[in-house]
């Protein structure tokens, strides 16, 4: 995407390339000695975007975004980014705080999770147990993502750079941009057998649920959060269920990636320091 690209050009790209996904992707990159059953710990050390971004919705006839039936006309809106103030000028009297992150970072998916487009080729759109297009805005600089490994070498890929995104991402896109710099550290953990990706920030553990049905995604996020709390905090699942109801915030990650997402924010501050220290993801 360049600042002079029109929504008609973007819509034509979607029509001419059905199913492949619209993302610019780097990878796959093999991780030495990574095998199925391992876990990759991805630490986001530095994320620096360019000075502009764009948010858009396709014409309604393409059926993308949450409300294609409401907005037949597509639109692309370019936004100048002030990287000193870390804000985007949406309109002269509306400025948005920036929180850059990669919408997509994942590994090769397990067999059968989503039909391949051709042998060895998958769509970049649906997220899954391999992470991928999570569109999780909490994965900003300083955060960590833990991903189960499903194939030898893991095969990391990333793209879909965002300057900022609201939970839900309802029009189809975040404030899409490019990155001047993306620096990550990859740590391989052997045979940890994590079933789903988990994220971590200084203040929260973040557990996810994914499904084409939003209610099912919520159910999976809740079950994953209960399991996380029961195993890490060493409490009963009934107590974990109650704790989720009073202290854990469940948010809609996105509703536009075929597979919808819900994430659970588990606050670290509610746990005593000695227990918090023991509650590691891997």
Image: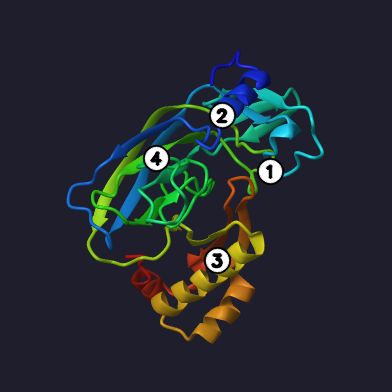
Q: Position of residue 276 (x, y in %)?
A: 40, 71
Can residue 226 be seen in this snapshot? yes
- Numbered badge on residue 85: 2
* Residue designated by label 4: 121
**Sequence order check, earlier mark of 1 and 4:** 4
- Numbered badge on residue 269: none
Q: Quadrant of the C terminus?
A: bottom left
Q: Nearer the viewer, mark 1 or mark 2?
A: 1
- Within 10 angstroms of label 3, few (less than 14), some, or many (20 or more) residues? many
**Sequence order check, earlier mark of 2 and 4:** 2
Q: Secondary structure at mark 1?
A: loop
* Residue designated by label 1: 170
Q: Nearer the viewer, mark 2 or mark 3?
A: 3
The residue closer to the viewer here, 86 or 125, is 125
* Residue designated by label 3: 221
**Sequence order check, earlier mark of 2 and 3:** 2
**Sequence order check, earlier mark of 1 and 2:** 2
Q: Left or right of 42: which side holds 203?
A: right
Could you give the CA–CA distance between mark 1 and mark 4, rounded to whole angstroms? 27 Å
Q: Secondary structure at mark 3?
A: helix
The residue closer to the viewer here, 91 or 178, is 178
Q: Nearer the viewer, mark 2 or mark 4?
A: 4
**Sequence order check, earlier mark of 4 and 3:** 4
Q: Left or right of 13: which side holds 196?
A: left
Looking at this rendering, what residue extends furthest in the top direction? 4
Could you give the CA–CA distance between mark 1 and mark 2, rounded to whole angstroms? 26 Å
């Amino acid at each position: 995407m360049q600042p002079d690209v029109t929504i008609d050009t973007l819509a034509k790209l979607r029509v001419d390339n059905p199913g492949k996904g619209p993302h610019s992707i780097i990878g796959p990159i093999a991780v030495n000695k990574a095998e199925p059953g391992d876990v990759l710990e991805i630490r986001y050390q530095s994320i620096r975007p360019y000075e502009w971004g764009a948010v858009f919705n396709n014409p309604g006839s393409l059926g993308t975004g949450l409300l294609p039936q409401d907005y037949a006309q597509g639109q692309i809106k370019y936004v100048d980014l002030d990287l000193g103030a870390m804000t985007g000028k949406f309109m002269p009297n509306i400025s948005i705080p920036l929180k850059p992150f990669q919408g997509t970072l994942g590994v090769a998916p397990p067999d059968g999770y989503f039909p391949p487009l051709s042998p060895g080729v998958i769509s970049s759109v649906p997220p899954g147990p391999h992470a991928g297009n999570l569109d999780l805005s909490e994965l900003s600089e300083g955060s960590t993502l833990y991903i189960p490994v499903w194939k030898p070498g893991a095969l990391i890929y990333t793209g879909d750079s965002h300057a900022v995104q609201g939970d839900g991402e309802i029009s189809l896109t975040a404030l899409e941009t490019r990155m001047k710099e993306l620096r990550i550290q990859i740590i391989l953990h052997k045979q940890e057998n994590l079933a789903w990706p988990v994220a971590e920030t200084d203040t929260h553990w973040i557990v996810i649920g994914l499904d084409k049905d939003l209610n099912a995604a919520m159910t999976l996020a809740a079950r994953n959060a209960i399991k996380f709390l029961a195993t890490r905090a060493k409490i009963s699942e009934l107590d974990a269920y109650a704790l989720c109801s009073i202290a854990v915030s469940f948010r809609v990650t996105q509703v536009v990636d075929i597979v919808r997402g819900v994430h659970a924010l588990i606050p670290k501050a509610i746990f005593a320091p000695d227990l918090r220290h023991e509650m590691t993801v891997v």
